[in-house]
Amino acid sequence: MEFLESIADFFSNIFYKCRETAGKTWSGITNFIKTRVITGKKIRGFHIRDLNIYKRFREFLVHIYLKRTVSFEKTGTVITWQPLPYIILKLTAALIASYLFFSLFPYLSKYLLQGILFFRLHEIYNFDLPSTTFLDNLAKIILLIVIGYIGIFYLKHQFQALLSSLAISACDRRLYYIKNLFLLKELYIFSIPEIDHVVLKQNILTRLLGIGTLLFQKKSGEQVRIASIKNASYVFSHLTALIGDKPAEKESITSGKMTQQ
């Protein structure tokens, strides 16, 4: 009887130990989620954004380039760029618009036929009226040329936006804007004391996505626009803190085209 009681006590202790360990583990997981995911606070120096390999790689490339190009201090530097999902969203919208534009070829075909009849080109140059199939193919070729011509420059712009970065150095009190196209790199350096004020522009969509356009007004009157950067509010507050006690403007717009400097 005592032997059975000892066995029962043994398994009972194991059960309570397992339940206590499971409770502590679950409590640690919930605290981690609350502090890291919800409040964004650090736990023993670890940040969940450190697992973002794409972010770390982009920052590493910017650090290496600036270190080799200029006298650059890594400490206290904020690096931002145009977010990849936003670029993918713009490319998707461009593809949809291109498809809708290409689907207008029947209307263009009718206009071509009406133009030939109106100017009597078939009578002047003595040729038979082209068939509907020929006019449709001609309209498709014209629309493809227009889409391709515009698409090349648009893709170049988006590709440049994908690779370009903005670095704000608190130690150097400078802004470094890297315009990158792999084969061609351009580095723009702005001294923070020379900046008169900075404007943050956001519409409803970009505010929800956490991106925005920064407009710098230099004391010389020159304006610099850097469009659609991620964490725009944080970058704006960090930059205005470096500028000093000078008033900065914050503007929200509901429409307007953003361009990349």
Image (cartoon, rainbow, N blue to C red):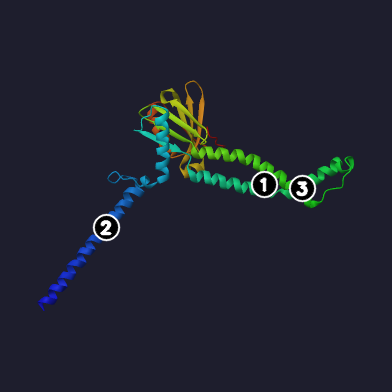
- Crowding near pointer 1: few (<14 within 10 Å), some, many (20+)? some
Q: Nearer the viewer, residue 155 or 251?
A: 155
Secondary structure under the numbered disc 2 in the rendered image: helix
User: Is residue 248 among what the camera can see?
Assistant: no
Please state which amino acid type lies under the numbered disc 1. Phe
- Crowding near pointer 2: few (<14 within 10 Å), some, many (20+)? few
Secondary structure under the numbered disc 3 in the rendered image: helix
Quickly name the residue at label 2.
25
Q: Distance between the Cα atoms at labels 3 and 2? A: 70 Å
Q: In x, y percent, where is residue 104?
A: 70, 48
Q: Nearer the viewer, residue 88 or 206?
A: 88
Above or below, 192 against 41 in this view is above
Is residue 197 found left or right of 28 in the rendered image? Answer: right
Q: Residue at x 81, y 42 (%)?
A: 115
Please state which amino acid type lies under the numbered disc 2. Thr
**In the figure, residue 54 lies in which quadrant?**
top left
Is residue 132 found left or right of 229 in the rendered image? Answer: right
Choose the circle earlier in sequence order: 1 or 3.
Answer: 1
Find the residue positioned furthest to the bottom.
Answer: 1
Q: Are marks 1 and 2 in contact (CB under 8 Å)?
A: no
Q: Where the N terminus falls, by quadrant?
A: bottom left
Find the residue positioned furthest to the top.
Answer: 220
Please state which amino acid type lies under the numbered disc 3. Ser
Q: In x, y percent, where is residue 169?
A: 38, 30
Q: Which mark is residue 101?
A: 1
Q: In x, y percent, where is residue 59?
A: 41, 38
Secondary structure under the numbered disc 1 in the rendered image: helix
Q: Distance between the Cα atoms at labels 1 and 3? A: 13 Å
